[in-house]
Amino acid sequence: MKPARTRVAPSPTGHMHLATARVALYDYLLAKKTGGQFILRIEDTDVQRTVDGAEQEIMDGLRWLGLNYDEGPDIGGPYGPYRQTERRDIYQSHAKILVDGGHAYPCFCTPERLEKVRQEQMKRKENPRYDGTCRIIDPDEAARRVASGEKYVIRFKMSHEGTTTAHDHLRGDIVTENQQLNDYVLLKSDGLPTYHLAAMVDDHEMGITHVLRGAEWLSTFPLHVNVVRAFGWEEPVWIHLSLFLKPSGKGKLSKRDGAIAMKDGYSVFIKDFGELGFIPEGVNNWIALMGWGVAEDDVMDLDQMIERFSVDHLTASPAAINFQKLDHFNATHIRLLTNEDLSARIKPYFTGTDLEVRDETLLKVTPLIRERLVTLDDCLAFASFFFRETVGPNPEDLVAKGLDAKQSAEIARKAYEILSGLKEVAHTVAEPPMRAYVEESGFSASQVFGILRVAVTGQKVSPPLFESMEVIGREKVLERIRRAAEILEKM
RNA sequence: GCCCCCAUCGUCUAGCGGCCCAGGACGGAGCCCUCUCAAGGCUCAAACAGGGGUUCGAGUCCCCUUGGGGGCACCA
């Protein structure tokens, strides 16, 4: 396959969304698969809606995901600039080409008039569309009015007859009656282009071979191919990705859903995932499989995805997002990390707590908790006790199931006795004598170890007991058991 | 309302006319392992929306119905 040039072209109007990440992922995979380039282009032509910091968030988000672009606003490239507001002249000269060629025309209608027309059309139950008033103005007359400084927009002169056949790689030919199409605005009165002009011009100028975008563009797809054809350009391969639906499957995933997801520890915004304890590997894998049909072995890192990716296996039907699956992929990829890597990734989650986390200790703790982590921040719940001086167990939790406080105290005392007789509490040396005690005492392993678990870790659920004791160290372990025995004796 | 797109287990999907009494993954149920929680292993339940065609043969092709989704801006 020839090297593909792909692009993700988000508008900096809010937080970077899951859908943007998925388009970027597929773009990246296609480009890397074919030895081509993946490009970031910022579509900031709606000055009103542009949000400060949004562009940076997009770049940070892509980098966090590991989707490094080959060309973009901050790193440049041979086809720049990569920010549409900096390409104003390019769009204006292209708009002129269309006007001169009879494919577009200046329109002097005011927004107020347009709104009135729309209202009347709706009242008559007609399709709201431009009524063509300025379409029939003589070109010389129009040019004169433009030159005189009258406000205008440039509209595409859509044919009223025949049909437009647009080819989508996943859906085949899509045939539309031209009467259904509107004379869309290409250049706004502020001199900036709309998407319909800007994206077509840039994709051509930047040599984009495959346009991947959301299915919400399907309705203006015929317009876009008409624009490209009016210029006489070769069309890229068009691929409209299925939409993401709310977890319920009811409706398109929206920014509003972000707030709802946040309450459950999830999000639809890329910037949040790191903080929530998700790792890029997990997020990428999760996103990749919504809209890409992989038969088997669906746990993949970026390189494996590149290996297996093909635009032929993309799917056309909408996909409801499923956060449980995110959990699964996240946990799975966490388990694939090396101790050193995982340890380093966990560490930041302890900042802000009063715990003093030493790297050396954390490295010993990591293997004990790795397969218990769904998200990185779970390390707080599983490993905090390693870094505390005392653990303050709940007295009731110290009483073993089926036993009373007195019996439990007896077990704690005996355990203290056995362990204090040892030079160290490495699990290989501490476990055998404790097992022997379980045998001779007649108590069950779960009763004895359960008491010790609560005594030593302060919690009912913890990593394996003896391995944990080994990390905590003999002195602290003995002290914690002694205190537990005291508590039990006072009950 | 009009236009467009989509349609296999609850969810994401494999399937591109016979290999399918439909495979995988998540989730669910059960069993095993087990010092808790996990992880891991094994097993089970769970789907081709409905109706017409085409064909020797249809989940796979065509049409209709139904359902879902998207769009109808000087927003992207």
Image: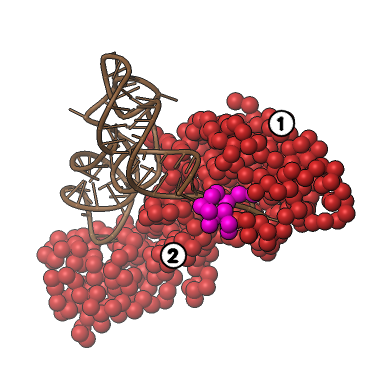
Chain colours: A red, B brown
Q: Nearer the viewer, residue A323 or B51?
A: B51
Give the image location of residue A5, x and y in percent: 66, 35
Of pointers 2 and 1, the one earlier in the residue sequence: 1
For the residues labelled 2 and 1, the Cα–Cα distance comes to 44 Å
Labelled pair 2, 1 in contact (Cβ < 8 Å): no
What residue did someone put label 2 on?
Answer: A260
Give the image location of residue A158, x and y in percent: 66, 39
**Left or right placement of residue B48 versus residue A319 in this view:** left
**Left or right placement of residue A78 versus residue A196 in this view:** right
Q: How many marks?
A: 2
Q: Nearer the viewer, residue A45 or A100?
A: A100
Residue drawn at the location 20% of the way across and 67% of the way down: A448
Provide the secondary structure element on which disc 2 rests: helix
Q: Which kind of residue does numbered mark 2 sit on? A: Ile
Q: Nearer the viewer, mark 2 or mark 1?
A: 1
Disc 2 and disc 1 on one polypeptide chain: yes
The answer to whether A392 is drawn above or below residue B73 in the figure is below
Q: Which residues are magenta?
A: A119-130
